[in-house]
Image (cartoon, helix red, strand yellow):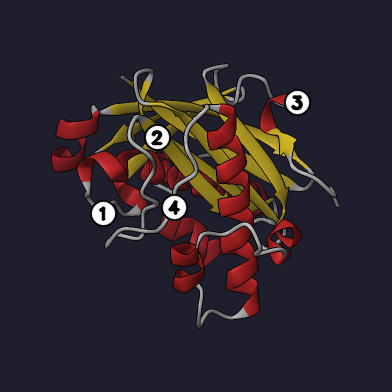
Amino acid sequence: MLPEPCDLQTFMPSLFSKSVLSRFAPTSFGEDESSLHASELEVILRAVPKRRREFTAGRRLAHGLLADLRKDSIPLVPDDDRCPVWPSGVVGSISHSSALCAVAVSLSERYQSVGLDVEDIHPLDEPLVERICLPEEISGLDSEQSGHRGKLLFSIKEAVYKCQFPLSRVFLGFHDVKVEIEGTHFCATVLKENAADITGKEIEGAYALHLGHVFSAARIFA
């Protein structure tokens, strides 16, 4: 496991453009809470150890990236919808699996929003595939193939959701997003009109496989 944070661009340059800073680390990076702001500590005051590590790893990574953007360190506390409140002029996204945490940030003058998701690559069970995937997204695949494709689509749709929600504040179900994949890039169509009217109907992005995980990134240009 990685002892220190690593830039996502080291293994997948096209995941985000150069104007997005992104980094990942093991969730054990969150065992040191000493750099958290008091209001951040309050958020996890009664949380179980696993949740504390995940939260702290994300905040430590985010504070480091904000320093790289030359932004002042402020508490990154969640709003009423559980979205991190970023400094003025910054957009960002935080994600974690049981093993890894990843963060992406950018200046809002370039992007309206970014969404990042990280998942382990274990395939989904068939009932979950049907809940997450539209029939046309897994057409022609056998059960094993659809399980692997389902996990990829799950990650992509999570990234798309995280990208659109701070703008639209509209909750999307998995069947409210249709994904088309070409190589390591994707185009997601938002089927729910009240969200698409705000974010645009199509949200593009890319994915990468690394360390037994899939990293998915979505973005909406300014």
Across and down, in percent, residue 108 comes to: 35, 25
Q: Nearer the viewer, mark 3 or mark 2?
A: 2
* Residue toward you, 32 or 183: 32
Residue 91 numbered mark, or none:
2
Mark 4 / mark 3, whichever is N-terminal = 3
Mark 2 / mark 4, whichever is N-terminal = 4
What residue did someone put label 3 on?
A: 10
Res. 187 image quadrant: top left
What residue did someone put label 1 on?
A: 171
Mark 1 / mark 3, whichever is N-terminal = 3
- The answer for how far apart the CA atoms under marks 1 and 3 are is 33 Å
Across and down, in percent, residue 3 comes to: 85, 49
Residue plotted at (40% across, 52% down): 84
Q: Amino acid at mark 2?
A: Val
Across and down, in percent, residue 106 comes to: 46, 28
- The answer for how far apart the CA atoms under marks 3 and 2 are is 21 Å
Sort mark 4 into few (<14), some (14-19) or many (20+) by Cα contacts within 10 Å.
Answer: some
Q: Is residue 217 toward the left or the right of residue 177 in the image?
A: right
Res. 49 image quadrant: bottom right
Q: Nearer the viewer, mark 1 or mark 3?
A: 3
What residue did someone put label 4 on?
A: 76
Q: Nearer the viewer, mark 1 or mark 4?
A: 4
* Residue toward you, 95 or 52: 52
Q: Is residue 6 toward the left or the right of residue 20 in the image?
A: right
Q: Amino acid at mark 3?
A: Thr
Mark 1 / mark 4, whichever is N-terminal = 4
* Residue toward you, 103 or 32: 32
Element marked by disc 2: strand
